Image: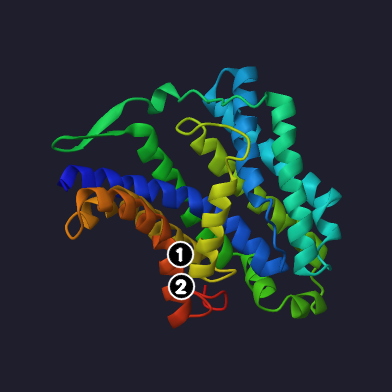
Amino acid sequence: MSATLLAVQTLNGLQLGILLFLIAAGLTLVFGVMDFINLAHGVQYMLGAYLAVAAYALTGSFWGALVLALIGALGLGLLLELLVFRHLYDRDHLDQVLATFGVIMFLNEGVKVVWGAAPLSLPMPDLLSGSIVLMDGLLYPVYRIALIGAGLGVALLLYVLVSRTRAGMLVRAGATNPAMVGALGVNIRRLFMLVFGFGTMLAGFAGILAAPILVVEPGMGDNLLILAFVVIVIGGIGSIRGAFLAALIVGLVDTLGRGFATDIAKMVLSPSAANDVGPAIASMLIYVLMAGVLFFRPTGLFPARSG
């Protein structure tokens, strides 16, 4: 295990953690404030990537595609909220799960109809192409570093919005006691719509950032949605701070586990056995982590009342 490989895998883990945070931040707000289980949140990540590809074809500019795709992701999110999701807020969680699962299937098939089933990609901006030397023997892509920086910037912006503004105060109060917030004269329906729209835009932003480095294809958000739910459970439902820290932890544990579990297993097992056991252990690590956190802190690391 070389220091260079460890550094690369750590940066890759931070990159995954940032993408998970952008998805989980909106998901934890929607779940915490609205008590609404939205399995279709990962689809917004996928739609952000597809909208970026379509916008790039129109503008020929990554930055133009970024702006248009963000607007499109917000618009589609609000449209889904208006047509589908707002009719589910007062239903039980089973109805929400079934309905939003149907939305996943509908939109996954929808992108196949519009863009086809073949994988697509978004060209990387020239400004962020190439690599830089981070340490002796370590070249790392500039775009991936910019992705990490953009995610940290969004995390800081969210912290300020949630902790230092009146809108953030309402969101935090809504996550803790929505009935009381409504009794004080706040339009809960409008608050729900704004929270939902903002959450979908964050998920779309994650998809846009991932499009130049990952394959854009139907269903690309499904696996990340599972990890995002792990993140919000570990961090504490409704907590932005919890989502941020848990996303980084999950990203690092998952990436480092997949990178080094087999090598560590070879220290105590034969090479053939380690090749079988290592990947199996790596795929379970984040769930073992979640179980451990819930055993000691059932409400997560930073529940909403302290987040």
Q: In which quarter of the image is residue 79?
A: top right
Q: Which of 109 and 132 is in front in this view?
A: 109
What amino acid is found at the position of numbered circle 2 in the picture?
Ala
Q: Residues within 10 Å of mark 2 (few under 14, many from 20)?
A: some
User: How far from the left and from the top, in percent, is residue 7?
Assistant: 23, 46
Residue 287 marker? 1
What amino acid is found at the position of numbered circle 1 in the picture?
Tyr
SS at circle 2? helix
Q: Quadrant of residue 264?
A: bottom left
Q: Is residue 183 left or right of residue 163?
A: right
User: How far from the left and from the top, in percent, is residue 217?
Assistant: 59, 32
Colour convention of the picture: rainbow
User: How far from the left and from the top, in percent, is residue 156?
Assistant: 47, 56
Tell me: residue 57, above or below residue 263: above
Q: Which of 17 and 106 is in front in this view?
A: 106
Residue 154 in view in this figure: no
User: How far from the left and from the top, in percent, is residue 262?
Assistant: 27, 51
Q: In this view, does 244 lie to the left or right of 105?
A: left
Q: Is residue 46 left or right of residue 242?
A: right
- Pointer 2 and pointer 1: residues touching (CB < 8 Å)? yes
SS at circle 1? helix
Q: Nearer the viewer, residue 45 or 279?
A: 279
Residue 291 marker? 2
Q: In this view, does 5 lie to the left or right of 53?
A: left
